[in-house]
Structure formats: C-alpha cells, structure tokens
Image (cartoon, rainbow, N blue to C red):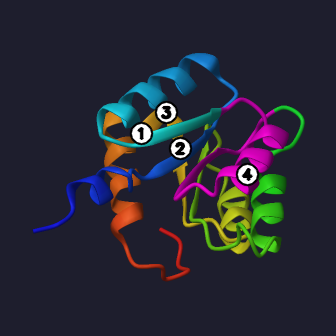
Amino acid sequence: MADVTAVETQVPRVLLAEDDRFLRKAAEVALERRGFKVLATADGEEALRVARDQSPNLILLDMFMPKMQGLEVLRALKQDAATAAIPVIIMSNVGEASDRRAATEAGALGYFIKSSLDLESLANLVKQALSAPPSGEGQ
C-alpha cells in the first residue's frame, strides 16, 4: 500500500502566468479544484522569478504580458539549466501561425487559444501534460 503522506506531499505545482486578473483567478480556482497547487503571477518578470524559485511541474504562460513577453520568458526558461526541463504551455488570444511556430521553436509543449479553451478543458490539458512522458514535442 502506498504511503498516503508521500502522495499528498506530491501535489503538482502549476505556475500560471496571466496578466488578466479575472482569467487568472478563474483558472486558479479551476486548477485548485482539480487538485493542483497554483502559483499565480501577473507579469513576465514575476513568472520567471517564481519559476526559478519554486520549480513548478508545469507552466501556463500568457503570450502577451507586462514587463516581459511570454516568448521572452519561455526562451529564458529554456536557456536556464534549472528550468529548461519544465514543460511550458503558451496561452494566447492570438492564433497566428508565426506565433505558434516561434513558441514551438523556443521549446513550448503546446500553444492554445484562450478563447477556445474553457476552464474544464484547461484543467484536463494540465493533467494530460503532467502525466505524459517528456518527449520534447509540441502539440
């Protein structure tokens, strides 16, 4: 039988970097209800700092944020040995092929349009990403 306390202490931590206060709070609540520990940030610099300090299991990263854009944060994360292996999913309201390509080339696991992804789907996406073996391939 598994050690229950060990399982309880291994709650997956998700860094949610989103500057829209309403969306950030709604996503935070939805993810916490599904059993994730959410580390919420509102700008790119804060997201990078929290990622380095807290080593989350997954990062949900808004493409356009104050202080530092999502793509800049993604590149910085992938260039840092301490954060390079953390899977990053880009969330954006822009679905341009060039943005998707840039995110994938920079190391994003996936790129999703926020307006077409409801909170239940977001929680399922996070669960899927955390249960998948690392492959380095985008979705």
Give the secondary structure at mark 1: loop
Residue drawn at (61%, 37%) of the image? 93
Give the residue type at disc 1.
Leu
Q: Position of residue 65 (x, y in %)?
A: 78, 35
- How many numbered circles are shown? 4
Tell me, for residue 53, which label it has, or none.
4
96 w.r.t. 17: above or below: below
Q: In screen coordinates, is 127 left or right of 38?
A: left
Q: In the image, 88: left or right of 128?
A: right
Cβ–Cβ under 8 Å for marks 3 and 1: yes
Q: Which residue lies under the disc numbered 2? A: 113
Q: Are marks 1 and 2 in contact (CB under 8 Å)?
A: yes
Question: Can I make out residue 118 in this image?
Answer: no
The image position of residue 20, as x and y in percent, is: 65, 23
Picture residue at 84% right of the left edge, 41% below the top: 45
- Residue 73 in sight in this render: yes
Residue 44 falls in image quadrant: top right
Indicate the position of residue 19 as horizontal and vertical percent values.
Answer: 70, 28
Q: Say whether marks 2 and 3 touch (CB < 8 Å).
A: yes
Residue bearing mark 1: 117
In terms of sequence position, does the residue under pointer 4 or pointer 2 come before the other? 4
Q: Which residues are magenta?
A: 41-65
Kind of residue at disc 4 = Asp
What is the spatial separation of the Cα atoms under label 1 and label 4, in whole angstroms? 29 Å
Q: Label 3 near label 4: C-beta < 8 Å?
A: no
Which residue bears the numbered disc 3?
115
